[in-house]
Image (cartoon, helix red, strand yellow):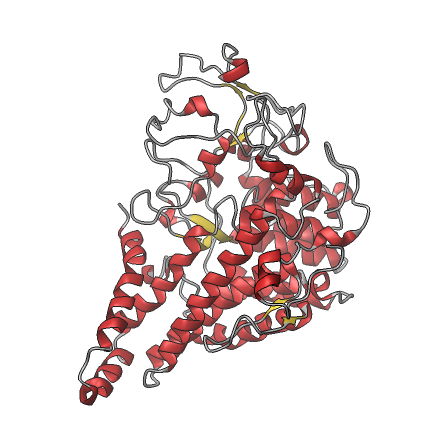
Amino acid sequence: MKKKHLLIAAALLVGVSIYSCKKELNPTKDSVTQSAAAGSAAYLKSIVLGTYTQLQSLTANNSMLLTSEESTDAVIVPTRVGGDWADGGMWAQMWLHTYAPGHANVRDAWNNAYNALGQINITISLLQGLPASPNTAYSIAELRTLRAYYYYLLVKNFGQVPLIKSSSTDASTVHSSPATEVWNFVVSELKATAPVLSAKTPAQDPSQYGRLNKWGAYFLLAKAYLNENVITGSTGTAGYATCSLYCDSLISSGYSLMPNFLDNFSSNNTGSTENIFVIPYDHIYATGLQIQMMSFHYNQAAKYNWGSTGGPWNGFSANADYYGKFNNTDTRKKGWQQGLQYAADGVTPLTTRGSDGSAPLNFTPLVSSLTNAHENEGVRQQKWQLTPGYQSQDADFALFRYSDVLLMKAECVLRLGDPVAALTYTAPVRTRAGLSNFTAGAFNADSLLAERGREFVWEGWRREDLLRFGHFGDAKQFKTPDADPHSQLLPIPIGALQKNPNLTQNPGY
């Protein structure tokens, strides 16, 4: 068990218990207790890390990262023969862009984000109630950065959202803030907090692992400026120029590519020099990473000692078009399961079940139907190393990776008119994947978008990438081109509108 996971999982309980106990203190001693708390780095760390535990639900199939991926060309969840994964058509709706305000995953993604923001605001308020000190200032800055991350997720997916900055705000009365206002808030918060945060990488200071430091704030600023035009409706290249500058700082920060792509997703990826900000997971103490359970076939349970877990569930997959982006020499292709599948001995063939009961389990890229696909159709994702016997895994989920910095820089340079210079930044990523770099004559925005699709599959970036490159509404298997752009924003959930009539629904819903 990784000690950091126990620390993060337990931190919330520690922090809550301390604050609960404080209520029982003798009032004449309360100021002494507050002063001691403000001066205790260990105490403040427990409070801050406890708030980070909210991230552990972010990778669920109904939370923000995967819900956004479900609306792209990267994740297809077809209804299987016999009706498994039909679920009232909710998965097909994400693929077809016919999601509505009552969609369960849209609702849950929204609720998950605002539940986390509520806890962050409460914790900031508690810390602001302590005597001011360098330690409290640092802790508040770190939490403001985490809050900015959640608002970035909300604004890029929903556009206009309620901007709740204080635990004293009545969430049932606040109005929607325009996307530009939310974007400005995210940027101003990050610019204010970044200078306060540590400039040390986790390799230089292990206590920074799983936390937002200066470089995490810079990464978010780079993302915000990269997507400024899409989020705010602005035009021009100013955002790309600013993003490029933040990428320059990140390139000199001390992070570097791991020699082996899959090492970033291993069960012991704490030593990754590439992962800038991660969600720490542990199959006992910090559960939640279950991507293989969503993707693998039911009968692979025996292979991975999942006999008593009720899974895997044979859902999430990729179709032939997306899988076709990977050529056979691309080492990232090892992150997919394709072809015949075997039991734990590596010899005994596995079979399908149900209507295909005696057929070999042979994962094929072809998905023949969105509403009646065979059990074996669609390739499966395995880049996150799993721990046999447990639904939840030990691999820490990288939210921000250094390879993204390089490809963001390449994109900015390309958009600013220098495609040859942009190839300087694609080269390390391509070389690590076992591929030659693009040639200047063949390099363009579409080839860069495809490269991002190979590098960051199912990591939560595909939706914003497709929007930025102008391909979100394109036709894809089973789907015609979007008739209008309203699906570029998710609908404000009907439950949120019912609780707060001051919120404004996005156009087209």
Residue 486 seen in this snapshot: yes
Name the residue at the right extreme: 483
Name the residue at the bottom extreme: 28
Residue 493 seen in this snapshot: no
Query: Measuring 72% from the left and 32% from the top, which residue is drawn there?
Result: 477
Res 133 → quadrant: bottom left
Res 500 → quadrant: bottom right
Q: Is residue 230 shown above or below 429?
A: below
Image coordinates of residue 371 in percent, x first then y, are 65, 28
Left or right of 264? Residue 427 is: right
Frontmost residue, 357 versus 459:
357
Query: Measuring 37% from the left and 48% from the top, which residue is drawn there?
Result: 281
Left or right of 15? Residue 90 is: right
Q: Is residue 487 shown above or below 241?
A: above
Query: Measuring 33% from the left and 46% from the top, which residue is drawn there?
Result: 282
Query: Measuring 36% from the left and 77% from the top, which residue is drawn there?
Result: 126
Q: In what quadrant of the picture does the N terminus appear?
A: top left
Frontmost residue, 57 versus 146:
57
Image coordinates of residue 49 in percent, x first then y, are 35, 63
Image coordinates of residue 317 in percent, x first then y, are 57, 32
Number of numbered discs: 0
Q: Is residue 319 shown above or below 175?
A: above
Left or right of 81? Residue 114 is: left
Left or right of 72? Residue 203 is: left
Frontmost residue, 445 versus 189:
189
Q: In what quadrant of the picture does the C terminus appear?
A: bottom right
Name the residue at the top extreme: 358
Image coordinates of residue 428 in percent, x first then y, are 57, 46
